[in-house]
Amino acid sequence: MIALASLLAGLVFGLGLIVSGMANPAKVLGFLDLAGNWDPSLAFVMAGAIAVGAIAFALANRHAVSILGAEMRLPSARHIDRRLVLGSVLFGIGWGIAGFCPGPALVSLGMGEIRALVFVAAMFLGMGAFELFERRKTFVARKQGSCRESRA
């Protein structure tokens, strides 16, 4: 049942991205072009999404399990650090260059958009590079920890 609910939620999300124009890079780039022919329509889409999300999170915080009985695993981090800022900057640069962010890129890929294929490939390469970096960092930290233990 959870898989079916996830599928339906994904379909509604994808349809919303198509209807709102978020899957159209030209519309997104028009929204980001503050100095040129600015298209403010996506600001309303974002405001609506923030309002719905705020209500959903407020309701979710009151429950330990979802309506379907799955454990609620909400984000707990509340601090802004260098990694968050750098990740946000990279996300914004990618969004501004390509006109895509991950959700709309996957929807556009499903619609056969070739530019989305390039974006999604680059996104997966970036995710892979991040994973390798994190594994290396964990390996180095463990190695340094074992070196300290052996000296003691």
Image (cartoon, rainbow, N blue to C red):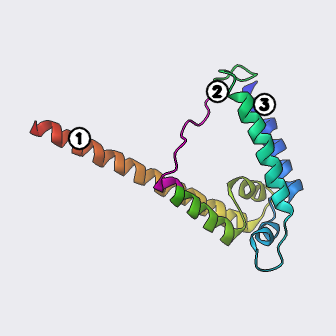
Residue shown at 61%/30% (left/top)? 73
Q: Secondary structure at mark 2?
A: loop
Q: Residue at x 61, y 61 (%)?
A: 91
Q: Residue at x 57, y 63 (%)?
A: 89
**Magenta span contains residue 56:** no
Precedes in sequence: disc 1 or disc 2: 2
* Left or right position of 151 against 64: left
Q: Is residue 91 above or below residue 50?
A: below
Which residue of the protein is positioned furthest toward the left in this rendering? 151
Predominant secondary structure, magenta span: loop
Residue position marked by numbered label 1 in the rendering = 145
Instruction: For mark 1, give the secondary structure.
Output: helix
Quadrant in the picture for the N terminus = top right
Instruction: Please name whichever residue, 51 or 144, is drawn nearer the observer in this view of the structure.
Output: 51
Point out residue 44 in the picture as x, y percentages from the top left corner.
85, 56
In the drawing, what numbered circle is on residue 5? 3
Determine crowd level at label 2: few under 14, some 14-19, many 20+ residues with C-alpha closer than 10 A: some
Looking at the rendered structure, the kind of residue marked 2 is Met
Indicate which label's residue lies in the foreground, 3 or 2. 2
Which quadrant would residue 11 be assigned to in this image?
A: top right
SS for tag 3? helix
* Residues drawn in magenta: 72-84
In front: 41, or 17? 41
Amino acid type, mark 3: Ala
* Number of marks: 3
Q: Which residue is mark 2?
A: 72
